[in-house]
Image (tube, rainbow, N blue to C red):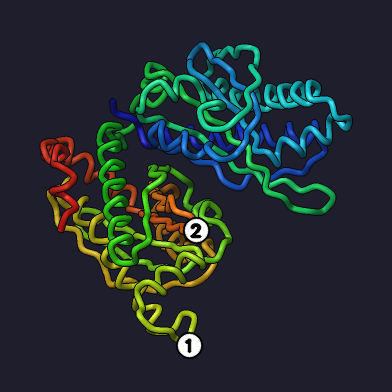
Amino acid sequence: MEIDIRELETYQELAHDGAESAAQSLSQLTGISTTVQVTNVSLMSSSDLEYEFIGNEFAGVNIDLRGEISGEVVLAFDEQGRTAITDELVPADDPEKKKSSIKEVGNIMSSGFVDGWANYLNAKIKSSPPTYIEGTGTDVLPKSATQDDNYLFVFRSRVEASQDGVNEPVDFRILLVPDSTSLERAFKPQTDKIVSVEKLKVFNDMTKEGAEKAATNITSMTGIDTTVEISRLTLVPIEDIPMEVGNKRYVGTVMEFNGKFSGHLVILFDQPSGRAVVDSLVPMETDEQWGDVEQGALKELGNIMTSGFIDGWANVLNAEIKHSPPEFVADTGSSIMNPITTQIAETDDHAFMLDSNIQTNSDQVFTCQMLALPRRDELEQALDDLLIENSDNTRIDPDELFDR
């Protein structure tokens, strides 16, 4: 299936407007002041989507859609959001009334989200009565998203809420899973800016293989047992990328790559993880927290982690891609990303962001985020060339691609 990138951008903007409408409805119903921080659309596997919901409790509604867009919509609040809403609407400790309040709020907010799509398509989209959902993982996901480990287009928003002058992040997620017929009809090419969904899947798979190789390299160099938990390809407005990464403090590396397509690769460790990596790589105590020795250790690791990504892409695309020496960075996530997005924004308003999270299953706390930001038009052209000229290369054994 081929999709129109410009249509995908339009639907991302519609999702943002829908999230704004949903957030306004929440404010009107509860008096909680809300601001939409980020809205994006991701292509990700159902298993990666499930992982995002494991470990935290959510409550919300599931709604079936019929019409020009058919499928399922789920609106889910995290525990903090659910508590804020129910405390405002149901002061008494009445579990059934609290469920009803979440159901009512979720229904009104979901309607605002869907109405914008219906208006854009100039068509009717019918919604079923809301079904209350509660739990973690597959308990709150659309049923169609858990039947097979296939790829899904997921629209999500993050909203910041403030009450009594205190800003608190209230995470509510709107997940839309259209059926295949609706998806093909909605993203039907209207311009020459088209891309094959199958090739996007291949590219995402190769990136996940690269992240897994990077995780293996971390383990072999540091002894820290790591694994790739989430890998997704996201279309996001460039101005939202710094907020997407957030204001947590990180250390890591930034590199540019050039060739068949160009862009940036950013590797970020949270502060404790960065320190753990350096302590494992540097066999002696140092006086400085991030002096030359520590920076050199992280740059060496970043260089090795990058090689799997770059070599894998180059093999799949049958082209040469080179990367610059790593630059050490230590700052908040948004501050690290701002110079990169400023440069990309000179030519683009949206970007494909490849996002892989590496964590550990052990008791040791460890988090590493790898972000690839290729130039959108160059990536589109590279994938188009792959479709026409190099489709056989997508069947390469990942071990052949990433073992050096």
Residue of label 1? 287
Q: Is residue 270 above or below residue 146?
A: below
The answer to whether residue 89 is left or right of residue 73 is right
- Secondary-structure class at tag 2: loop
**Residue type beneath disc 2:** Val
Q: Residue at the front extreme? A: 363
**Image point 77% across, 25% down: which residue?**
101
SS of the residue under disc 1: loop
> Which residue is painted at 48% across and 47% down in the image?
237
Q: Which image quarter: residue 94?
A: top right
In this rendering, is residue 370 above or below 209?
Answer: below
Closer to the camera, 32 or 356? Answer: 356
Whole-percent x, y for residue 3 in the image: 33, 30
Q: Judge from the rendering whether residue 392 lies leftward or rightward of residue 212; answer left or right.
A: left
Residue 131, given in percent of the width and then of the height, sits at: 63, 17
Residue at 40% from the left image edge and 22% from the top image edge: 183
Measured as percent of width and height from the top left, residue 71 is found at 48, 18
- In what quadrant of the picture does the N terminus appear? top left
On the question of residue 285 being in view, the answer is: yes
Dot 2 corresponds to which residue? 365
Please report contact status of discs 2 and 1: CB closer than 8 Å, yes or no: no
Q: Amino acid at mark 1?
A: Asp
Q: Residues within 10 Å of mark 1 (few under 14, many from 20)?
A: few
Residue 318 appears left or right of 144: left
Residue at the far bottom in the pictured view: 287
Of residues 308 and 134, the one drawn nearer to the viewer in this rendering: 134
Compared to residue 308, the image places residue 36 above or below, namely: above
